[in-house]
Image (cartoon, rainbow, N blue to C red):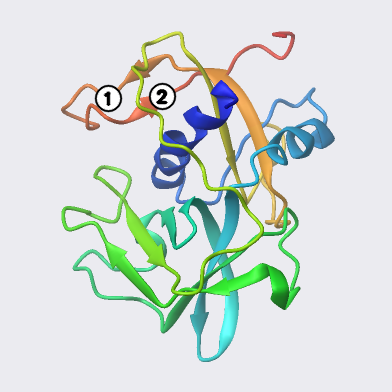
């Protein structure tokens, strides 16, 4: 198992919570194609969305962790009291979020982590359950090691991109990935200790 891949399972939700599930920033001097190519190595990261009045809407990202389960951020589907925001939830397996029905799976149930606060300052976690198994993707493997500052980690997801020069750009529904080092954890006061932080490296960094 690729070490980068097992890191991804735990990190996607940290990014989804901190960035509202929609943002991956990139260096101005880096090629957009490189982020897409790297992200496409992580096929267990899938697009996620909601169903509202029979219409399908892209929301953010999820990680397939079992043929019947996908892990995502709670604020996509629940308000702060735990009440569902929409009538349904789904995932899409394509790297560019196509409308191919063979690649789209509708959740039978979805569950909010009981202690979730549905914001960036708490355990923003939810699970989507699929009775017919999710076909066509190998689930991510849970990382059971110890992360320390300086560890190399990979982050992948869908949503909005941009640079300091452009600001946020409209979502283009492409899966992107990046690699960075883990610089620090939350201090336990402003952010919980399980919050992970990475600083931007200079553009010339390999």
- In the displayed structure image, the side of residue 101 where residue 131 appears, left or right: left
Residue 154 found in image quarter: top right
Relative to residue 171, is residue 11 depicted above or below?
above
Q: Which mark is residue 123?
A: none
Q: Is residue 51 left or right of residue 120?
A: right
Gap in angstroms between the C-alphas marked 2 and 1: 8 Å
The spot of residue 116 in percent (x, y) is 22, 54
Horizontally, is 86 left or right of 164 in the view? left
Residue 78 lies, in percent from the top left, at 31, 68
Q: Which residue is mark 2?
A: 197
Q: Residue at x 59, y 85 (%)?
A: 55
Residue 84 versus residue 73 in the image, above or below: below
The image's mark for residue 186 is: 1
Asked whether the residues under the numbered discs 2 and 1 touch, taking CB atoms below 8 Å apart as contact, a structural biologist would say: yes
Q: Secondary structure at mark 1?
A: loop
Q: Residues within 10 Å of mark 2 (few under 14, many from 20)?
A: some
How many numbered badges does the structure rendering display? 2
Q: Residue 193, how many percent across, how many down?
A: 23, 26
The quadrant in which the N terminus is found is: top right
- At 63% from the left and 50% from the top, the residue drawn is 160
As drawn, 83 above or below 174:
below
In this view, the residue farthest toward the bottom is: 53
Where disc 2 sits, the SS reads strand
First of labels 2, 1 by sequence position: 1
Residue that appears at 72% across and 59% down: 94
- Towards the viewer: 6 or 131: 131
């Amino acid at each position: 198992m690729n070490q980068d891949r097992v890191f991804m399972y735990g990190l996607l939700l940290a990014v989804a919570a901190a960035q509202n599930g929609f943002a991956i920033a990139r260096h101005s001097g880096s090629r957009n194609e490189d982020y897409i190519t790297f992200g496409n190595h992580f096929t267990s990261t899938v697009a996620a969305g909601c169903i509202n009045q029979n219409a399908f809407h892209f929301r953010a990202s999820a990680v397939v962790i079992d043929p019947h389960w996908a892990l995502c951020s709670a604020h996509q589907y629940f308000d702060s009291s735990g009440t569902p925001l929409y009538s349904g939830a789904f995932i899409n397996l394509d790297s560019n979020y196509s409308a191919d029905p063979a690649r789209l799976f509708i959740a039978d149930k979805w569950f909010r982590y009981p202690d979730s606060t549905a914001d960036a300052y708490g355990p923003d976690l939810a699970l989507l359950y699929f009775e017919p198994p999710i076909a066509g993707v190998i689930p991510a493997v849970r990382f059971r090691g110890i992360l320390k500052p300086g560890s190399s980690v990979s982050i992948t997801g869908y949503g909005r991109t941009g640079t300091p020069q452009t600001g946020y750009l409209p979502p283009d529904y492409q899966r992107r990935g990046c690699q960075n080092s883990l610089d620090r954890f939350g201090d336990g006061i402003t952010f919980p200790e399980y919050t992970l932080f990475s600083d931007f490296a200079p553009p010339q960094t390999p």
